[in-house]
Amino acid sequence: MQTQKYSIQQPLIESLLTWVKDGEIAIPEIQRPFVWDKSKVRDLMDSIYQGFPVGYIITWKNPDVRLKNGTLSGGKKILIDGQQRITALRAALMDEYVVDQDYARIKIKIAFHPLEQKFEVQTPIIAKDKTWLPDISAFFQPGFSLIKLNSAYLKANPDADPDRVEASLGQLANLAKRQIGVIELNHDLDIETVTEIFIRINSKGVVLSQADFAMSKIASNEKHGGPVLRKAIDYFCHLCKEPQYYDHIKDHDTEFAATEHFKRMKWLRTETEDLYDPDYTDMLRVAAGVEFGRGKMSDLVSLLSGRDFVKRTFEESVVEESFQRLASGVERFSNETDFKFFTQILRSAGFVHSKLMRSQNAINFAYLLYLHLRGKGLSRNAKLQGLVRRWYVMSILTERATGSFESRFDRDIRTLNERDAAEYLAEIEAGELSDAFWNSVLPGHFDSPVVSSPFFGIFLAAQVNSKDHGLFSRHHTVHDMLLTEGDVHHIFPRAYLKKHGMGRSLYNRLSNLVFIDQPANITIGAKPPSDYFNAVLEAVDRKGTIGDLRTKADLKANMAENCIPESVFDAGVKQYERFLEERKVLMAAKIRGWYEGL
């Protein structure tokens, strides 16, 4: 028989806000951005005023943990769903600041029109209009007098209906007395069950990130420095994307700016590298993998809750140790020298632009491997660099970091803690990167019509690494074109194929794409490849108008760099599919040669 997994309460809104203020319900760090626009805050106030349902707030009680003296310490409730609604209530009713998506501290003032019983976001015009009450938070401040306000409003609006005004103001004053539903999930539920409950309750069916659970656990534990650690994670990830935010933190969060965490972030204030811009999920996954040797986010949540996996109990000593180790992992993750050297390793493989980095999970594990090897005492030598490069590319080629990757992630971490990394990688390569893979599986990926495919990114990285030139170019490399004004060119032009009845799934095949400079691309227009390749062939000795190749030897070398088969000189629409078959084999062969040289 299944037991009920939750309880339901119907507290007053003012009681809920008091619980939050007193820390009885721990909201994830208040510095997290408020993503609602102001009109949604207005709509929430109107729904509550009208007596409409506004959804459930969902909390999850932290498990009771056993202290060193044998007693049990009761856990706080953490907010699982409803942060935006609670933040909106605090902003509108309690006059509190919120942090917007640009991390600026703002106030959201909601105005009320007693005669029309209408809410609106305050504007300068509304603030000057006597028929509006410009800020409803005044109703919920200490010392507020409804009688005085009613009298002042009628004096300012002598034509207003006194009974209507009194009824409207009275209803507004009781806004905080309205009930709101709170679902409290049992403390002994595992993350998978909590996630399923969330999805079933949430009408939008939004999948709740397990990293969000972990961040909530971190933020709610003041005893072990959780709020500061939470900020360290949030701020680091934000600074990776927006270095200019450094001064904002220094000026507006002076308490955190005095910590060692912030001092270690100083290097980010001038950092412009964007190959690896992690979010908090990425940072938690890598830090936990390195420190705990576990790849499942649910295990991190359990450890932060104090779970002893052997005794199957919750212990305060486990909580303390877990927070210390996670803080250590965060410090290792954000180390300037290691972070920069890791991105240099990726660059050295040919990944010179973020548009080539199509799998964040693969980057995460490559960085985890790097930190793992550094922790084993390996210097930043050629062996370490080669292992990291090959592992990252192997993960892309085998799609190891896609789909339901977490179990594989966990298994790989555990294996690396028991075995030599080079031996383990060689075993994976022998099993998954066989001749059949290179000759059949990989070429098949170039049938995809999706330009953002990671396999096209892999091909371009191979070209960058080989210092290949763009099509028909003697001076401009693929590397240059990725960073400046290069175009992705359809070898069989789109307009040409569309004229012959072919759709996107055919003309956009990856094996039909190549990098070329803009002037050459414009000159080619909709000509079939047999026309413009022969034109280049005939013109190279007298410096033709397409590209800047000088000799037939230049053209032959350029075609080899870009994996263009010789059959292109006779290629019209009837030869299109044969051309694609030939080229995708050449593209796969180039990638194989590059990979084996990493």
Image (cartoon, rainbow, N blue to C red):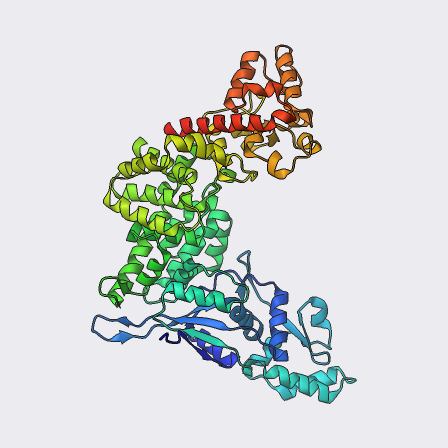
User: Looking at the picture, does residue 448 appear above or below residue 171?
Assistant: above
Of residue 359 and residue 26, the one placed in the foreground of this image is 359
Task: Give x and y (percent) for residue 498.
Answer: 68, 34
Residue reaching furthest to the top: 541
Residue located at (61% from left, 67% from top): 40
Which image quadrant: the N terminus? bottom left
Q: Does residue 227 show up?
A: no
Quick check: 477 above or below 165?
above
Could you tell me how many numbered marks the image carries?
0
Residue at the spot 51% in from the left edge and 49% down from the top edge: 244
Q: Quadrant of residue 29?
A: bottom left
Report x, y in % for residue 323: 31, 60
In this rendering, position of residue 35 left or right of residue 382: right
Relative depth, front residue between 502 and 420: 502
Q: Is residue 251 left or right of residue 132?
A: left
The answer to whether one can see residue 397 in this image is: yes
Question: Which image quarter is the C terminus in?
Answer: top left
State the image quarter where residue 220 is shown.
Answer: bottom left
Q: Is residue 61 above or below residue 380?
A: below
Nearer to us in this view, 168 or 297? 297
Q: In the image shown, does 457 or 256 lie closer to the viewer?
A: 457
Instruction: Please say if 204 is above or below 178.
Output: above
Left or right: 402, with 368 as reference point: right
Q: Residue at the location (74% across, 82% down)? A: 156
Q: Position of residue 328 (x, y in %)?
A: 31, 53
Farthest residue, direction left: 69
Residue 178's x, y, as percent? 56, 82
